[in-house]
Amino acid sequence: MKVLVINCGSSSLKYQLIDSESEEVLAKGLVERIGIPGSVLTHRPEGKDKVVIETPMEDHNIAVKLVIDALVDKDHGVIADLSEIGAVGHRVVHGGEKFNKAVLINDAVKKDIEELSALAPLHNPANLIGINACEKNMPGVPQAAIFDTAFHQTMPKKAYMYGIPYEYYEKYKVRRYGFHGTSHDYVSARAAEILGKDRKDLKIVVCHLGNGASISAVKNGECVDTSMGLTPLEGLIMGTRSGDLDPAILDYIGEKENLSAKEVNTVLNKKSGILGLSGGVSSDFRDIDAAIAEGNEKAKTALDTYCYRVAKYIASYAVALGGIDVIAFTAGVGENNYVVRKQVSDYLAFLGVKTDDEKLKIRGEEIVASTPDSKITIMIVPTNEELAIARQTLALL
Ligand code: AMP
């Protein structure tokens, strides 16, 4: 069967068509600027040249229709007929406390996703638009929702409660949820598989270091703690997000810069992190590395602050897990950036971490990068959220 994986944003739509038997990606692509001038679909069929289609797309219905047309097109298509798509798996960002696993979508599920928009106003409404557009264009094809938060629902209460009045949890569900769950689940499972061990017997720390970044502590196959919170702003320093800070900063900066709480929130989400700390160099680590090579001090501060915080989080998860067996690096930075992996690992030498630096330098491959006598196994495990979504979708059918 072929599973279409959809990741819908408010003006974008990413997709992959995956053959569930061979787990091969048959085609993938991206639609950008939906509902705004300059809409464009970039379609990448496996084994054929990419196609760029620039045409107005008023809404997501038209975008989904164009994706389907591209998939069945006689020249750049990869399937003969739409009926070959057996299911659609949607990435949905917030499942709240309601969803601790993936589910098949029906009207009740859609209503829940809509209600959870209060907790993820930028994401859940867009995810729902994608679901409705697929329903309309592929009537009768089963659709599944795979939630970013679901894997973290096993966290104990002491890990997800904030130290604020309890009534805010009761009234507004203010608590820590965690995100990137599909990746943390996939990478921890894959790490155990590579080591030839049962995930249930391991204490694993997964470092998902991408443009957004989060860490999770996985014990006996379940998440016991993670660094993101009510929203994806908490935790590590990220590409443009601040991560943890003193909440009093909001009020202080707001007063000094004459900004509303909402405006400061935007600064913390869009202008902070590596971008902000480096004095505006970039949110991309490739640019940071290049700036450091040219002697840029702020870029160096950004990198050092980033790595220090990652290492502190990992060490704190030794408490959450009662020890650490495996640390797995994943996502854009985790898979590609040797300097980050090395700095973080060196901080953890006191826990008995010893790296094999030739292996630690390898990029984007599944690899064990610690020495045989290291007390903790250091790994690079490329994530594959789309494949994980396709697998979970198939499992529901
Ligand atoms: P992600 O959100 O997982 O796509 O990660 C994006 C980030 O990964 C970028 O901002 C880069 O900092 C980093 N990255 C991606 N590819 C590379 C690469 N080839 N070398 C170094 N860093 C990379």
Image: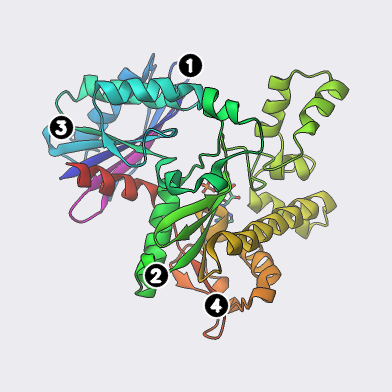
Q: Marks 2 and 1, how far apart in space?
A: 50 Å
Residue lying furthest right: 256
Amino acid type of the residue that numbered disc 4 sits on in the rendered structure: Ser
- Picture quadrant of residue 94: top left
Callout count: 4
Q: Position of residue 327 (x, y in %)?
A: 53, 66
- The residue labelled by disc 3 is 82
Instruction: Give the magenta part as a residue range.
Output: 14-33
- The residue labelled by disc 1 is 36
Q: Position of residue 187 (x, y in %)?
A: 42, 58
The answer to the question of whether label 4 and label 3 lie on touching residues, with beta carbons closer than 8 A, is: no
Camera-nearest label, 4 or 3: 4
- The residue labelled by disc 2 is 201
Query: Which of disc 1 and disc 4 is earlier in sequence?
Result: 1
Amino acid type of the residue that numbered disc 2 sits on in the rendered structure: Asp
- The residue labelled by disc 4 is 370
